[in-house]
């Protein structure tokens, strides 16, 4: 079983930067991509972005593409989300997730965060990011 564990969430001020992490452990990751999602109180889960496992292509939601960067450190087996110029509306619990490489939508979900049925296979527990003015 692949296990994902987020860390690094904290309180920051508007305009500041923050990097959060997603450590991948357990057996070798067998999916097509890892992604970041976030959920603010009383709101639906929102796709932030993703990185493909094989060639490290990145995809982002339009609302964050100019401020957020996803990367992966092979040596540490860890995915990162670097956030700059943070806004109040970035406040949310951030989750990392991944697929198992099978199922409808497995080869495309990472472009938009949608389309994998029924849902992504691996999820972390989440890390709280709060942006204060």
Image (cartoon, helix red, strand yellow):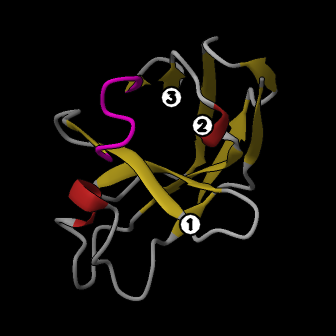
Q: Nearer the viewer, residue 55 or 129?
A: 129
Quadrant of image for the C terminus: top right
Q: Secondary structure at mark 1?
A: loop
Residue 11, percent from left and from top? 83, 25
Alpha-carbon span between mark 1 and mark 2: 18 Å
Q: Which mark is residue 129?
A: none
Residue 121, percent from left and from top? 49, 72
Of mark 3 and mark 1, the one earlier in the sequence is 1
Residue 109, percent from left and from top? 26, 66
Residue 115's quadrant in the figure? bottom left
Residue at 81% across / 27% down in the picture? Answer: 10
The residue pinned by badge 1 equals 45
**Which region of the structure is painted magenta?**
61-69
Alpha-carbon span between mark 3 and mark 1: 17 Å
Q: Which mark is residue 22?
A: 2
Q: Nearer the viewer, residue 44 or 87?
A: 87
Of mark 1 and mark 2, the one earlier in the sequence is 2
Classified by dominant secondary structure, the portion drawn in magenta counts as: loop
The residue pinned by badge 3 equals 81
Comparing labels 2 and 3, the label whose residue is closer to the camera: 3
């Amino acid at each position: 079983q692949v296990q994902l564990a987020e860390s690094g969430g904290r309180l920051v001020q508007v305009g500041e930067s923050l990097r959060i992490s997603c450590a991948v452990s357990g057996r070798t990751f067998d999916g097509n991509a890892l992604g970041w999602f976030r959920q603010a109180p009383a709101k639906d889960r929102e796709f932030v972005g993703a990185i493909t496992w094989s060639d490290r292509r990145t995809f982002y939601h339009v609302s964050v593409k100019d401020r957020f960067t996803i990367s992966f450190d092979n040596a540490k087996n860890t995915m990162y989300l670097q956030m700059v110029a943070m806004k109040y509306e970035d406040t949310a619990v951030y989750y990392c997730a991944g697929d198992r490489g099978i199922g409808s939508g497995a080869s495309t979900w990472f472009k938009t965060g949608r389309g994998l049925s029924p849902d992504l296979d691996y999820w972390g527990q989440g890390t709280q990011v709060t942006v204060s003015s």
